[in-house]
Amino acid sequence: MKHLGDLAYFNRFSVIVITGGSSGIGCSIIKAIKKVAPESVVCNLSRSKPEIFLGDNGRHFPVDLSDASALAAVAEAVKLKIATSPAGEVLLINNSGFGDYGRMADLDLDKQLTMIDLNVRAVVDLTARLLPILLERGGTIVNVASTAAFQPTPFLATYGATKAFVRNWSLALNEDLRGTKARALAVCPGPTRSNFFKAAGFDTPPMNQGANKGLDMSADEVAARTLHAIAKQKSLTITGWKNHCIAFFGSKLPIVAVTRVGGIILRKMRLEQHKK
């Protein structure tokens, strides 16, 4: 944590609900949360069990969040867990998501639609189902977007669009919640050392290659910056100054030109990958 004052802030949360905490950014967030709020009840919603211990009061809920009926069922189980937990605020972290690189015509349609279900519908669905509890007890909703949310992303077309939705929806939701006991935060990481690139079809993360080397961050760094933003009650945070620059130019320059430049960069990443 960047400031000692951040540590005390997390005492208010008695329950942390996180999706996709089995690895990557989600797992790092759980580790960071357990350091600042060791008595909190952690509920992880993902297909795989987390790599770390959730605590004596923690619980893993195995679920495929892209399945609407499965999400509805697990949301009821989470509500019961919250109801039987100590009084306090609830921290909901919608972290689950994945991407898929390539030209739209070359990609599997079912995977693209599943991506929309997980990256967009599940975020809105789970938040809406738990929102009455957060309004009653108080709490924070954290939605993990991406720097891809700030401009169209060729070869990542569906992924970038889903993250643009998450960013804009989160900011609007935070305004909807103004004056209540709940608030929302959109977190926009850049390239992160995690399983994301492997799931998206890369053998080697492109940010480890050539001129791109050093542009990524560790999942632990992203987690630390996320917790700092929560404690500062921000509505939007971009992790790292390099990512701030990417987001700034992506949102300020003409959108057609930004899309063209993005296509050139992402096409080059694919070509470099295929040469290996």
Image (tube, grey):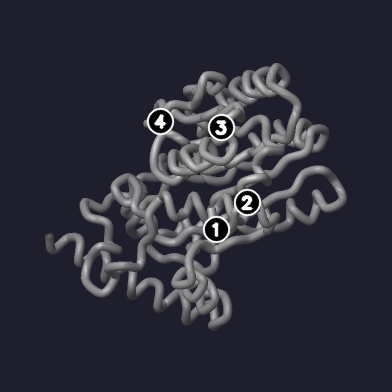
Which residue position holds label 2? 6
Secondary structure type for disc 4: loop
Which residue position holds label 1? 2
Q: CA distance from mark 3 to mark 2?
A: 14 Å
> For the residue marked with disc 3, what is the amino acid?
Pro
* Label 3 neighbour load within 10 Å: few <14, some 14-19, many 20+: some
Residue lying farthest to the right in this orientation: 179
Q: Nearer the viewer, residue 97 or 224?
A: 224
Q: CA distance from mark 3 to mark 1?
A: 18 Å
The answer to whether one can see residue 149 in this image is yes
Chain-order first, disc 4 or disc 2: 2
Q: CA distance from mark 3 to mark 4?
A: 13 Å
Whether pointer 3 and pointer 2 mark residues with C-beta atoms closer than 8 Å, the reply is no
> For the residue marked with disc 4, what is the amino acid?
Ile
* Label 4 neighbour load within 10 Å: few <14, some 14-19, many 20+: few
Along the horizontal axis of the image, is 237 left or right of 89? left
Chain-order first, disc 4 or disc 1: 1
Secondary structure type for disc 1: loop
Which residue position holds label 4? 52
Chain-order first, disc 3 or disc 1: 1
Which residue position holds label 3? 38
Residue 232: image tag: none
